[in-house]
C-alpha cells in the first residue's frame, strides 16, 4: 500500500485534467491512497460531490508565482499546494509526491527539506525510456548541466540500486559517449569508465552512442543531465514527426484510410509499447524523499503512469536502496 500526495497545479493542463486522471487511478487501485493538493476555487468544479474512500482533497489558498525563480523557495514560503505536499512528505504523512511542476522547483523544495546525498551533490532525474525490447533506466535527464567522474559514478550507483531490485543477474550499464572507443570522450567519462570496470556487481559494457540506446540491449544508460535531456527530447520529436507524416499519408484518401485501418490493427501493440506516455514519471533521486516528476503536458494516461511510478518507488523502497548504495560508494 502506498500513500501519495498529488499536486494538481504543476504543468500545462491543471486540475481539469489531473483530477479525473487521479480519481481514475485510485478507483482502479483501491489499495493505495491519494491526497490531492490544490486551490479550492480551481479544483472544486472538477471534484465529485463524494470522493472515493481512498482519496481526500487538501485545499490550499495560494499558488506559486508564474515567473518564480526556484531559488526563492529556499527563502520564502508561498503556501502553495506543492509546498504543502512536500511538508506532508517530510512529516511522513505520505510516502511520495507526484507533480508536473518543472524540475527546478521540485529540486529547490527538496533542498528546503534536506540535502542530497554527498555522492551526487544534487538530485538526479531518473527516467524510463521505451526501446525496441524493453524500457531501460536512463539518468541524468535534466537535473544537471554537466557531471564529474565522481557524479557519474553516483548516477551509476543510483541506477544500479533501482535495476537490481527486479533482476537476479548483474544489471548491464553503459556510459553515453560520442563513440564506443575507449579513448573517446571527455576525461570525466573515461575516468568513470575505468572505475566502473572494477565494480564486481555490475555488467559494465563500456561506451554507447545515442543511436544504440533504443535497441534495448542494456538495463542502464548513464550521462549528464544536459546530454540526456537533449537525447530524449530529440527522440520524442523524431517519433512525433514520423507518426505525423504517417497519419498524413494514411488519411489523405480512401485507399490510405483502408490501408490505415489494417495497419493500425497490426501495429497497435508496437505503438502501445513505444508510447512515451506509458513511460512517464521520472524519479528525483539522491535524497530520502520520494518525488516523481510528470511531464508538464502529460495527459490522463501519462499522469496515471506517473502515479504508478510513485507506487513502484514506494513498494520497491527505491530511495532507501539508493541511499544505501550511495553510502557504499563513499566509504
Image (cartoon, rainbow, N blue to C red):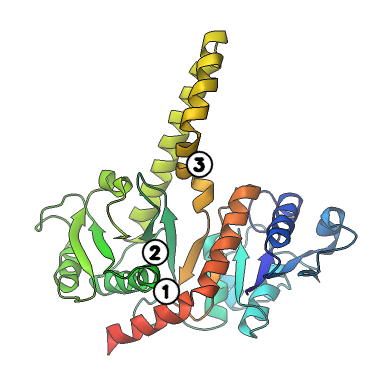
- Per the rendering, the mark at residue 272 is 3
Above-or-below relation of 279 to 79: above
Residue 60: horizontal and vertical position, in percent? 79, 70
Check contact, mark 3 vs mark 2: CB within 8 A: no
Of the numbered discs 3 and 2, the one sitting upstream in the chain is: 2
Q: In the rendered image, which residue does mark 1 sit on? A: 122
Q: In the rendered image, which residue does mark 2 sit on? A: 144
Q: Nearer the viewer, residue 3 or 138?
A: 3
Callout 1: SS: loop
Spatial CA distance of label 3 from label 2 is 31 Å
Classify 10 Å Cα crowding around label 1: few (below 14), some (14-19), many (20 and above). Answer: many
Callout 2: SS: loop
Residue occupying image coordinates x 68% and y 80%: 88
Q: In which quarter of the view is residue 292 placed?
A: bottom right
Q: Residue furthest bottom?
A: 331
- Per the rendering, the mark at residue 40 is none
Mark 3 or mark 2, whichever is nearer to me: 3
Residue 43 in view: yes
Residue occupying image coordinates x 63% and y 58%: 67
Amino acid at each position: 500500500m502506498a500513500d501519495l500526495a498529488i499536486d494538481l497545479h504543476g504543468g500545462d493542463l491543471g486540475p481539469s485534467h489531473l483530477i479525473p486522471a487521479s480519481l481514475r487511478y485510485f478507483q482502479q487501485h483501491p489499495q493505495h491512497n491519494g491526497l490531492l493538493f490544490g486551490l479550492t476555487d480551481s479544483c472544486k468544479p472538477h471534484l465529485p460531490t463524494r470522493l472515493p474512500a481512498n482519496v481526500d482533497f487538501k485545499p490550499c489558498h495560494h499558488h506559486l508565482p508564474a515567473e518564480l525563480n526556484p531559488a526563492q523557495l529556499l527563502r520564502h514560503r508561498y503556501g502553495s499546494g506543492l509546498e504543502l505536499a512536500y511538508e506532508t512528505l517530510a512529516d511522513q504523512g505520505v510516502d511520495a509526491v507526484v507533480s508536473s511542476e518543472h524540475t527546478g522547483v521540485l529540486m529547490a523544495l527538496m533542498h528546503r527539506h534536506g540535502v542530497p546525498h554527498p555522492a551526487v551533490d544534487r538530485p538526479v532525474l531518473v527516467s524510463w525510456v521505451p526501446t525496441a525490447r524493453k524500457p531501460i533506466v536512463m539518468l541524468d535527464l535534466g537535473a544537471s548541466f554537466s557531471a564529474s567522474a565522481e557524479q557519474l559514478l553516483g548516477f551509476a550507483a543510483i541506477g544500479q540500486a533501482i535495476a537490481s531490485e527486479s533482476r537476479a543477474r548483474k544489471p548491464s550499464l553503459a556510459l553515453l559517449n560520442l563513440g564506443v572507443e575507449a579513448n573517446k570522450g571527455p576525461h570525466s567519462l573515461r575516468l568513470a569508465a575505468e572505475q566502473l570496470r572494477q565494480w564486481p556487481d555490475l555488467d559494465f559494457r563500456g561506451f554507447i552512442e545515442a543511436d544504440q540506446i533504443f535497441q534495448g540491449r542494456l538495463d542502464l544508460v548513464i550521462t549528464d543531465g544536459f546530454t540526456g535531456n537533449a537525447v530524449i527530447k530529440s527522440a520524442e520529436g523524431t517519433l512525433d514527426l514520423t507518426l505525423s507524416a504517417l497519419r498524413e499519408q494514411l488519411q489523405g484518401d480512401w485507399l490510405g484510410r483502408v490501408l490505415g485501418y489494417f495497419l493500425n490493427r497490426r501495429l497497435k501493440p508496437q505503438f502501445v509499447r513505444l508510447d512515451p506516455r506509458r513511460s512517464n514519471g521520472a524519479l528525483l533521486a539522491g535524497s530520502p524523499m520520494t518525488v516523481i516528476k510528470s511531464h508538464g503536458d502529460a495527459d490522463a494516461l501519462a499522469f496515471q503512469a506517473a502515479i504508478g511510478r510513485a507506487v513502484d518507488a514506494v513498494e520497491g523502497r527505491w530511495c532507501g536502496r539508493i541511499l544505501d548504495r550511495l553510502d557504499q560508494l563513499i566509504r
